[in-house]
Amino acid sequence: MQSITRRQSCGVLAAAVFSGPALVPSAAWAASMQSWPLGTSQPTGIHDVAPAPDGGVWFTAQRSGHLGWFDPGTGRSELIALGAGSAPHGVIQGPDKAAWITDGGLGAIVRVSWPDRTMRFFALPAGAPPANLNTATFDADGNLWFTGQSGVIGKLVVKSATVTVRGAPRGRGPYGICTTPRGDVWWCSLAGSFIARIDRRTGDSTIVEPPTRNQGARRVWSDSRGRLWVSEWLSGNLSRHDPAHGSWRAWRLPGGSPRPYAVYVDERDKVWVSDFGGNAVFRFDPDSERFERFAFAREAAGVRQMLGHAGEVWLPESGTEHVSVIRTS
C-alpha cells in the first residue's frame, strides 16, 4: 500500500456555466475540485464511491476485488479483499453506518462493518441465474433493494437475512436505483430505456416510459421533492420525471457528443451529472436551467457514479485510478 501527500494531489480546476450554447462565467456558484491518485500497489478498477462515517471515502475496486477506503486527510488508500472471484460494482452507506456492496463476481450482497472491517455475505438464492449485480438502495423500512443488469430486481430483508430476486420486466437492463424522500423505490433500465417504480409490498415493478425513445436510462436519483432525475446515456439528455404530475422535461448536455453516465442530487437540489463524451462533470441548476462544467485534467476520467454529503460531491475516476471531490461550501 502506497501513501501520497497532498502535494501530489491535483489542484483546483476551472468551472464555467453553459446557458444554451453560450459560455457564461459563474462567480455565484463558487466550487472547486481536488483530485488524488489512489496510489495503490495494483490497479483497482475503481467504480463507485460512498462517503464513509469516519470522514473517509469507500470505493469499489471492481478489477481487483476489493472494497477500498480513501483518507482525504492523508491521501492514503486501503484495500480490503472481498474474496476470490469478487468484482464489486456499487457501494453505499447503510443506516447502520456499514458499507453495503453489490458484488457481481460473488453474486452476493456484502456488508462490511465499520470501522472493524468484518464482513458478512448475503448470497443470491440457490439456483438463481447470474444477475450481474449493479446498484442498491435502502428503503424506509431498512430493507435493501438492488438491481442486476442481467435482468434482476432483488430485495434483502436485513432483519431476517432473506434475499429474494425476481425477473425484471422486459429482461436485461436494470441499472441505477434510488429511494425518494417519501420512501418510494425507483430503478432504471439501460437496455430497456425506461424507469420503473417498485411496489415494496409485492416487489412488482410498474414501468414509466420517458418521452425520448431508446434514450438509455442509466442512473436515477431523487431530489427533495421526489422528482426523479435520469442520466440518458444514449440521447445525451438529463431528464426529469415528476411522478406527482406525470410530467417529463429534458435538457441536452452541452458539447458535441455528450454521454451522461452518473447522476446525483445534492442537499441544495442541484443536479450533478458526469459526461463521458466531454470528459467532465456538470452541475445543473433547475431554477435557472443552466449547466456549469467542471473539466478533468486527465483524459478519459470515466466517472461512473457520484455520491456526497453536505458541501461535497465525490467522484471515482475509473479511467485514471484517481478519486476527486468537488467542494461547494
Image: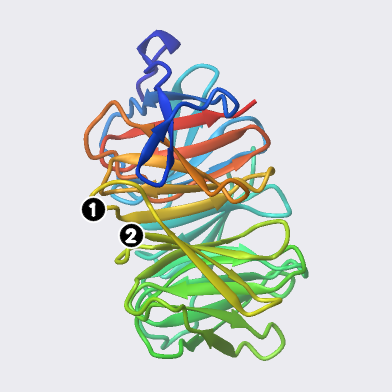
Determine contact: label 1, label 2, CB under 8 Å.
yes
* Residue beneath disc 2: 236
Pick out the residue farthest to the top.
7
**Quadrant of residue 152 in the image?**
bottom left
Residue closest to the eye, 301 or 229:
229
Which mark identifies residue 257?
Answer: 1
| Residue visible at 23% across and 49% down in the picture | 256
**Residue 40 picture quarter:** top left
Residue type, mark 1 in image: Ser
Q: Is residue 239 above or below residue 67?
A: below
Which disc, if any, is residue 249? none
Secondary structure, mark 2, is: loop
In the image, residue 177 lies at what x, y percent? 54, 67
Q: Residues within 10 Å of mark 1 (few under 14, many from 20)?
A: some
Amino acid type at circle 2 is Gly
Counting from the top left corner in percent of width and height, residue 276 is at 29, 48
Q: Residue 94 at x, y = what percent?
A: 67, 54
